[in-house]
Image: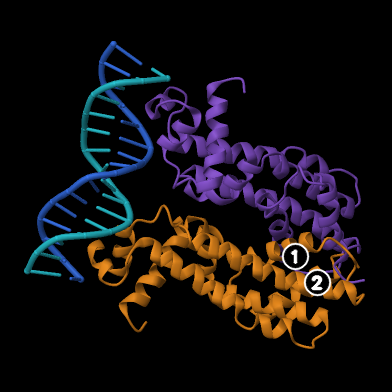
Chain colours: A purple, B orange, C blue, D cyan
Amino acid sequence: MKNRKDLIHQTAQNLFRQNGYAATSMRDLAEGVGIEAASLYSHIKSKEEILQYICFKMADEFFEGLEEIETSDFAPEKKLYAAIKKHLEVIANNRDAAAVFFHDWRHLSEPFLSDFRQMRRRYENSFRHIINEGMESGIFKKGDTKFIVLTIFSAMNWTYDWYNPKKKLNADDLANDLCSIIMNGLKK
Amino acid sequence: MKNRKDLIHQTAQNLFRQNGYAATSMRDLAEGVGIEAASLYSHIKSKEEILQYICFKMADEFFEGLEEIETSDFAPEKKLYAAIKKHLEVIANNRDAAAVFFHDWRHLSEPFLSDFRQMRRRYENSFRHIINEGMESGIFKKGDTKFIVLTIFSAMNWTYDWYNPKKKLNADDLANDLCSIIMNGLKK
DNA sequence: CCTACCGATCGGTAGG
DNA sequence: CCTACCGATCGGTAGG
């Protein structure tokens, strides 16, 4: 923890995750940091600025490396695996921030809210392209790409809620197990 | 809408879904209903009472019929399909309430919070039994039952966020498509 | 179902 | 980083 601002952000992520953004007061945050509420404002401009930082930092993390995977010459199946693994790693490495990212983005004010929605749509489209590629190349069954992508995201995005990297399952195994279900299903 | 109390609950579900429980004030709710804030209290005891009603009503809906499926003589695959379909129907028929149920249960106070967690655990266990049965009978691949159940729930529970029953996809098709991915995977 | 109001708490500022 | 404080809003009550 190199400075106060980082400590404030980390404490905020943890409290927002536990109680939600709206139900966490600046006095709660100040107490967690160990200073008075008024003192927070020498480091940050507003409560929402913290939320903005968390949401857009996470978005950056998710995007980082995705384009590289998308434009690579991997086969679609390998691309999808790599993208899923990357996504799960970002969640696993930022579990508090991921919870805030998934739950509390709706409390962003404009124009941040619109920006956020647009980034998310762009991100989902990258996955759709990979799925479509796989269908066209014949490796995936034909199906409703939008539905499939939403299902994959659902399965991935809930992991922040239960995944504990300290247990036996590491992010690589998690990605493998999830891909196994998505790719091959439950049936023998 | 037969009475005021129902209108209050329905308005609350809608507002809680849009803004979250904590960020919705009793004055917002009163305005949505079309009365003064103080007047709400002739119909309800407190803000949290509304949340309790929504959460436990949804829990009842989810449980209804599940035991029948679980103890039926269906094959495990058919049981799982029936349970998933039932679960998706409950979400599709109560989309606002489902959103509140999944997001805002954490704002319940004790002892409701503990009761809620216990019910959810019991519900998840029913799904685990079905999966285990399927593994023992040889129809499902062996695997980490807990992980599989969490993945299935993840995929199911995100549908409230995007599923629109007015579009072409009805609840039956949705259950079929989801089961198809879960059972058979994406690959040809 | 309303008017009038309560004490508590909210996000944030002034000034040092 | 603190003390002192602001106006606004919170969930809820009294009394009719």
Number of other residues with Cα within 10 Å of mark 1, as a class: few under 14, some 14 to 19, many 20 or more: some
Label 1 near label 2: C-beta < 8 Å?
Answer: yes
Q: Position of residue A143 (x, y in %)?
A: 79, 69
> Residue extending furthest bottom?
B73
Name the residue at 27% across, 67% down: B41
| Amino acid type, label 1 | Val
Residues at marks 2 and 1 on the same chain: yes
- Say which of C8 and A71 sits in front: C8
- Pick the residue in front: A126 or B53: B53
How far across and down, in percent of the image, does residue A188 sit?
93, 71
Q: On the rendered image, what quadrant is the N terminus of chain A found in?
A: top right
Element type at mark 1? helix
Q: Residue at x 73, y 65 (%)?
A: B152
**Could you say where residue C15 lies in the image, as x and y percent from the top left?**
26, 15
Disc 2 residue type? Ile
Q: Residues within 10 Å of mark 2 (few under 14, many from 20)?
A: many
Q: Which residue is mark 2?
A: B131
Q: Is residue A53 left or right of residue B31?
A: right
Query: Residue at the spot x=84%, y=56% of the render?
Result: A177
Q: What residue is pinned by disc 1? A: B149
Q: Earlier in the sequence, mark 2 or mark 1?
A: 2
Query: Height in image: A169 above or below B8?
Result: above
Relative to A98, is A127 on the left or the right? right
Residue A186 picture quarter: bottom right
- What chain does mark 1 sit on? B
In the rendered image, residue A133, in percent from the top left (x then y), is placed at 84, 57
